[in-house]
Image (cartoon, helix red, strand yellow):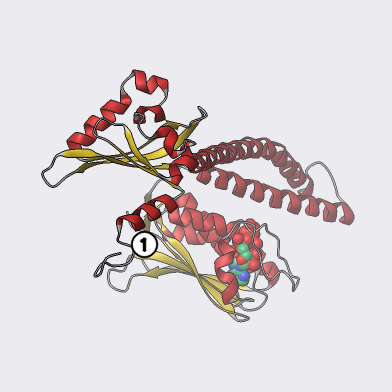
Amino acid sequence: MGPGQAPGEGEESVRLLVDAMREFAIFTLDPMGRIASWNTGGAWIVGYERDEIVGRHFSVLYSPDEVATRTPSRVLQSVIETGKSDEEGWHVRKDGSLFWANLMIAAIRDDSGQLRGFGKVTRDLTERRKLEESLREKNAAMERALLAKDRFLATMSHELRTPLNAILGYTGTMLMRLPGPLNAEQEKQLRTVQLGARHLLSLINDLLDLAKINAGSIDLRREPVSIRAVVEEVVTTLRPFAASKGIELSADVPAGEPTIRTDRRALSQILLNLANNACKFTERGGVRIEAVADPIDGRVSAFQVKDSGIGIRAEDQARLFQPFVQVGREDGGDRNGSGLGLHLSQRLAELLGGRIEFSSDFGRGSCITLTLGGD
Ligand SMILES: Nc1ncnc2c1ncn2[C@@H]1O[C@H](COP(=O)(O)OP(=O)(O)OP(=O)(O)O)[C@@H](O)[C@H]1O
Ligand SMILES: [Mg+2]
């Protein structure tokens, strides 16, 4: 190394560096495409030792098919025209096996622009390609499985609902004593059957909705929806439940006939689940459903369901939107459910351009806000 020369810049150092790069076959070609230098990486990846390959045309790296269709000379021609080529393709090892490689070639020219040869860097990407292929296959298999699951759920839900409706229908008429009198024990048992069947039906309906959302086939139609009508429907549905627990259920809708542009069924499904949760997890006090009007234009774009129930710990809040997650079942009480309600409600809210958020004071109550997007 001469004086004033930085360490590692000499030609010898560069040769050593190139040789040390075993993951890359780095070599040069003369202007005719004959191999002029060859590094250890070349021996590792392609299999030829230096003295076996130097002097041979670089088309030995291509398959006979590609040589026949003149790929090697076309590659060189394009490098001469554009300066370099950076592609991926197959190369042939000394033993005849193929490997997938990143094939970079650059033209080497002297100061006068005269072509002196080519530099070529080749990296074996076979493993990466295999990995990518197997990932692609796994993804495709997963997608097929998910689709099959959703299709299965959709058919099964339908098949399950028919007999369930028969069970619910006949328990209903028996409880109304249409076929004849019932003694106290029969009535008690029939009520248990009815409760179980109702629970099963709502679970099946939730699963079917979720399958539809996942399959992208849920049908949401936005139209002006009467807020008062939806809120009253929810209150009417849940009043017997609230009454049976001795808690108050009330609603607050701004004066007049406020409407909101959204899907009616989805909105009432979300509110019903939020208010049902609120009643379920409240033992004292009450539950209130409020339609929140914008202070400036007076339009309603949000709903709040407030309760004075057990509350939700801050650390549990995000988790509750996952399917089948429930917390706080330890203290008894009526805690029927499968943990799908909030997940489904959040998915529906998102499809309607909105979201559901919690704010809760653990042990004192919760306030769940549903915001709906505009058009
Ligand atoms: N207002 C609330 N107060 C306290 N905990 C709540 C409230 N709302 C929801 N939770 C908690 O979130 C969990 C998930 O609610 P989600 O509606 O998803 O399921 P679920 O009501 O248990 O069952 P499902 O709605 O499927 O019948 C509940 O089990 C409960 O632990
Ligand atoms: Mg619920």
- Residue 275 appears in the rendering: no
Compared to residue 141, the image places residue 297 above or below, namely below
| Along the line of sight, the residue nearer the viewer: 176 or 270 | 270
Instruction: Specify whether 182 is left or right of 271.
Output: right
Q: How many marks?
A: 1
Give the quadrant of residue 364. bottom right
Q: In this figure, which residue is indicated by the disc labeled 1?
A: 258
Residue sitting at x 66%, y 37%? 156
Residue placed at 52% from the left, 45% from the top? 214
Q: Is residue 137 visible?
A: yes
Q: Nearer the viewer, residue 37 or 288?
A: 37
Q: Is residue 180 left or right of residue 120?
A: right
For the residue labelled by badge 1, is the local secondary structure a helix, a strand or a loop? loop
Quarter holding the N terminus is bottom left
Q: Which x, y percent locates residue 189?
A: 84, 53
Queried on whether the Cβ of the residue with tag 1 lies below 8 angstroms from ligand 1, the answer reads no
Q: Residue at x 68, y 73 (%)?
A: 246
**Which one is nearer the viewer's eye here, 198 or 188?**
198
The picture places residue 104, in percent across and down from the top left corner, at 33, 41
Residue 184 x, y percent position in the rendering: 87, 56
Q: Residue furthest top?
A: 68
Residue 58 in the image: state x and y as whole percent: 35, 31
Task: State the image quarter where residue 170 is shown.
Answer: top right
Q: Which residue is at a point 79% across and 50% down the rendered structure image?
A: 193
Report the amino acid beneath label 1. Pro
Residue 100: quadrant of the picture: top left
